[in-house]
Amino acid sequence: MKLHVTSLGCAKNMVDTEFMIGKLLKSGCSLTEYPEEAEIIIINTCSFIESAINESIDTILELAAFKQNGNCKKLIVAGCLPERFREKIADALPEVDFFLGTGAFDKILDAVNGSFDNSVCYLPEPNSTPLQKADDSRYLATPHMAYIKIAEGCDKKCTYCIIPKLRGKQQSRTITDIVSEADALISAGVKELLLVAQETTDYGRDLTSTDNIEKLLDELSKISDDIWIRMLYSHPESINESLIKTIASHDNICSYYDIPIQHVSNSVLKRMGRQYTSNDLHKLFETIKQIDPHAALRTTVMTGFPGETDRDFQELLNFLKEIRFTHMGAFIYSDSEDIPSHKLPDHVNKEKSEERYNQLMFNQAKISLENNRMHINKIYKVLLEKITPDGNVKGRTYFQAPEVDGLTYITSNISEAGNHIGRFAMIEITEAQEYDLTGKFYEHTL
């Protein structure tokens, strides 16, 4: 059977998708990028916020059309959307033949083969499913880089977040299993390993051993010197000096700190259920800059949270101007009846929230441009990823994570670059834009 698979949402979802595809390919299925050719269409969904829910539904309806206008015989929807809305989603989306929850990714072959009798949904408890293992079959969408999910679930109680309900309690994989997967990926040609979890820096806290994120990073760094290890989705509460020193002391671990702070106003943080203060955040970023001066800092913030005043917002804006993050993502609070923050008083209206969001993005664009201009005439190691249609090469430096940050475009001496995609090269930066950089190969680095 021919499969077409669409993955929505975060990198953690992409990992689940790649393991589902791996299981299906092992069973004899084949993959097609053209949905009109597929007999089976699978959509791995996100439902974290309203915009993600809408994107998931729009994608389902778009691909459902191939049941009428293509070869599709079965449409399967997996992941967070069915997990959040449970059995009632079957009535809302009759176009879908089967729904799998977040605890059922390992049952994708049963869903394809129709092994669930007459049921339309399979929604086991998320924690009831074994964690992915190093020897599980996996289809790698990008041969030069791979996300490694080091833990599943979350034990935090942020009032705006549905993730613990959708993904269960935190479950960390063993260091041995993670290192085994990383070793196999590197042997297959992967040059960048990206560690992901709901809270990567909480890794190991649920294990009975002394395993923690520092120990994991130490072990991964021993596999090869010719790789990058990048950690995403850190939490401000679980980053300490020991972790910062570990990152700074290894050349193959990117000095890249992705730390979603959400806000800095103490009153807003308290209502969010975040267990740190504005003072804690100041100390954290000061410590990172002292120990690891070349660190790239990325954060995500939220505006429009219930009760956020003009003063709270100004405090957030001032903090961003002070820290001058390398990269920043922002989003507007997304309300829903099934999250605790829905019951909080003083919800911020849509117009005010959008105005604040636009201020955040305008401010960050100026900071990003000023930061990027500081890279001009400097030489950086760049992972070459793709030749663009106009004949240039695009890649990333250590301070540019895939999907969420800018890119580095190389515009000269590219005739030999085709054979070097997926490898590192030294690049001299010649131009800077708000989010992207332009450079040229430094002497004869290919």
Image: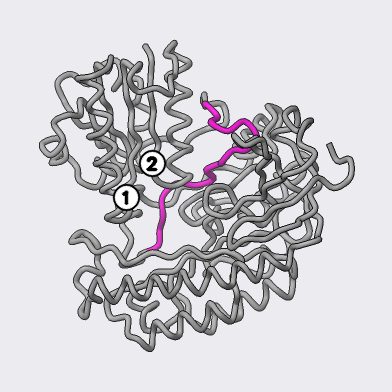
In the rendered view, tell whether residue 350 sits above or below residue 376. Answer: below
In screen coordinates, is 141 left or right of 73? right
Query: Picture coordinates of residue 85 (x, y %)?
Result: 20, 46
Q: Earlier in the sequence, mark 2 or mark 1?
A: 2
Residue on which the image places disc 2: 8
Type of amino acid at the residue the image marks with label 1: Ala
Residue drawn 16% across the image and 40% down it: 89
| Applied colour scheme | one colour
Q: Nearer the viewer, residue 398 or 84?
A: 398
Q: Nearer the viewer, residue 262 or 72?
A: 72
Q: Nearer the viewer, residue 31 or 280?
A: 31
Per the image, label 2 sits on a secondary structure element best described as loop
Q: Which quadrant of the view contains residue 13?
A: top left
Residue on which the image places disc 1: 52
Residue drawn 20% across the image and 25% down it: 97
In screen coordinates, is 22 left or right of 180? left
* Magenta stretch: dominant secondary structure: loop
Label 1 environment density (alpha carbons within 10 Å; few <14, some 14–19, many ≥20):
some
Q: Is residue 284 magenta?
A: no
Residue drawn 27% across the image and 37% down it: 124
Type of amino acid at the residue the image marks with label 2: Leu
Quadrant for the C terminus, please: top right
Which numbered dot is residue 92? none
- The residue segment tinted magenta is 139-156
Q: Is residue 211 visible?
A: no
Label 2 environment density (alpha carbons within 10 Å; few <14, some 14–19, many ≥20):
some
